[in-house]
Amino acid sequence: MSATVEHTSAQGWRAQLQLTFAGRAGRTCLTERQHHGPLLVQRPFYPEGNVCHAYIVHPPGGVVGGDELTLQVHLRDAAHALLTTPAAAKFYRSDGRTARQEQILRANDSALEWLPQESIFYPQAKVRSTTRIELTSGAKFIGWEIACLGLPARKQPFDAGELHLHLELWADHAPLLIDRLRICPEGRWGLDGHEAIGTMLAYPATRPMVDAVRELEQAGVEMGVTLVDKVLVCRALAAQGEPIKRAFIERWQTLRPQLLDRPAVPPRIWAT
């Protein structure tokens, strides 16, 4: 385990966090943890026995232009980990520099749940964010990402800035889903005026899982559900992020018993 901190006003924060989870005698343990800069993980929690709940924390509370955050997570040996964040991620307006975030999540013969809070992109933010999920050897995955554009409650739309939001899901080294989303004030086609976007994935999914999700309703959310190459893809649009988050939590509660053979146990941090 190691920890160092580095920051310069010219370059911004350089933060890295590497985590390894492994099954040990029927219990998932955080076996390796390394961090460099302000990206941390709280101690593991076990609210449901052998499943490890871990909270990813970014102490500065927000990301500015020039910051670079890198998260690498590896699950092996029949581990089961649920990862979330204690609060929404905030990407503030840029002085011209680009903020960069890379999240690589790998699971080998394990179950991974990636359930972060929403990301809020302030007006004039410039961000490149990539989340790549790599699954092998019978791994299972449920996860989501939610992007909120601007600050609609303050009547501050995302009318300046640029976002490159990438989401990928790979299984046995084959790409099953690759999303490339570029958002800028002059290129927001397809959003129909909505300020929040969400994508939820589950793998390996079945037709009954899709049918169960389609039966659910959520006021204030436009949603579509598809099944391609055993990937359940749920896409959502709304005026704000909170309705999407509620909708995704309800769908997670529906899918988890079917996919992971466990009832849904919400992380304690969600109640604070």
Image (cartoon, rainbow, N blue to C red):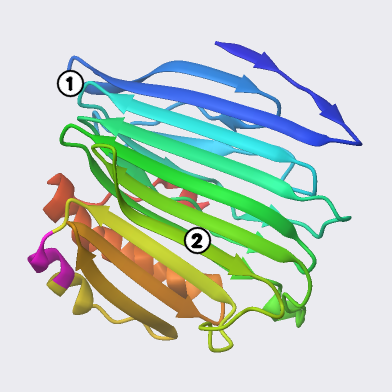
Say above or below: 225 vs 5: below
Q: Which residues are magenta?
A: 206-210
Q: Is residue 141 visible?
A: yes
How much space separates mark 1 and mark 2, taking CA atoms?
38 Å
Identity of the residue drawn at 53% across and 82% down: 191
Q: Nearer the viewer, mark 1 or mark 2?
A: 2
- Front residue of 269/183: it is 183
Would you name the residue on which mark 2 appears? 180
Q: Residue furthest bottom?
A: 192
Say above or below: 216 vs 201: below
Say above or below: 184 vs 53: below
Identity of the residue drawn at 32% across and 68% down: 234
Identity of the residue drawn at 49% across and 31% down: 72
Q: Amino acid at mark 1?
A: Gly
Q: Position of residue 55 (x, y in %)?
A: 49, 37
Q: Position of residue 48 (x, y in %)?
A: 26, 37
Would you name the residue on which mark 1 appears? 26
Q: Secondary structure at mark 2?
A: strand
Q: Is residue 262 visible?
A: no
Which quadrant of the structure image shows residue 127?
bottom right
